[in-house]
């Protein structure tokens, strides 16, 4: 089985296409693209996705944007990213990982729960500030659901 590798990148805008896989608004991405640390996700020799981590609290790392290109989905790579990132940030002294997703992102909610995250809080009306409404699974994205996972050594 091949494993993923997270490679820190400096030139962030060349990954906009990947970032848009996980966030519907380029305008919103522009607001946070230079925060935290951006990693390209490599599988074998291919760059297959992107993951942006920010640090909202001293011991908390947040997955701000994580996307796997469609051709590579369903292969367990997202799970490997979570495992690799959990080990990486635990070794750096972080104790908690959080991620936010839309109330309409049914697949994301299932994925993160399968990856050890639990419901943590809800930011009501969060996505109403987006320039254009978006729908997934026939549901309008309105609220942000934040999930939490403890990072254990």
Image (cartoon, rainbow, N blue to C red):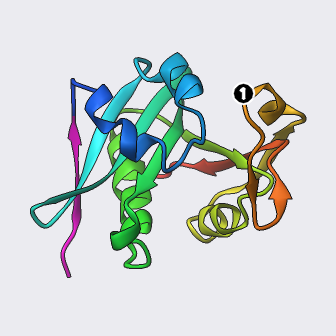
Q: Main secondary structure of the magenta part?
A: strand
At x 41%, y 72%, the residue is 73
Instruction: State the image quarter where residue 1 is shown.
Output: bottom left
Q: Residue furthest front?
A: 132
At x 41%, y 23%, the residue is 36
Q: Vertical placement of 68 versus 19: above or below? A: below
Residue 63: x and y in percent read 52, 40
Mark 1 is surrounded, within 10 Å at the Cα level, by few (under 14), some (14 to 19) or many (20 or more) other residues, namely few
Q: Vertical placement of 120 versus 31: above or below? A: below
Q: Is residue 58 visible?
A: no
The span picked out in magenta is 1-8
At x 36%, y 65%, the residue is 80
Q: Nearer the viewer, residue 32 or 18?
A: 18
Q: Is residue 43 visible?
A: yes
Q: Vertical placement of 127 versus 76: above or below? A: above
Q: Residue furthest left?
A: 45
Residue 129: x and y in percent read 78, 25
Q: Could you tell whether 151 is left or right of 6 in the image?
A: right
Q: Which residue is mark 1?
A: 131
Please check the rendered image and state whether residue 15 is part of the magenta-colored stretch, yes or no: no
Q: Residue furthest bottom?
A: 1
Q: Could you tell whether 128 is left or right of 86 in the image?
A: right
């Amino acid at each position: 089985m091949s494993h993923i590798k997270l490679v820190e990148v400096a030139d962030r805008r060349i990954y906009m296409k990947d970032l848009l896989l996980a966030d519907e608004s380029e305008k919103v991405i522009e607001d946070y693209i230079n925060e935290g640390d951006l990693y390209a996700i490599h599988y074998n020799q291919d760059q297959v996705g992107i993951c942006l981590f920010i640090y909202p609290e001293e011991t908390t790392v947040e997955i701000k944007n994580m996307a796997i290109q469609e051709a590579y989905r369903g292969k367990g790579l997202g799970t490997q990213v979570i495992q690799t990132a959990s080990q990486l940030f635990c070794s750096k002294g972080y104790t908690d990982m959080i991620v936010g997703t839309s109330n309409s992102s049914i697949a994301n909610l299932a994925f993160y729960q399968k990856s050890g995250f639990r419901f943590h809080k809800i930011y009501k009306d969060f996505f109403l500030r987006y320039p254009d409404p978006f729908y997934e699974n026939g549901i309008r994205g309105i609220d942000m659901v934040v999930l939490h996972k403890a990072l254990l050594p």
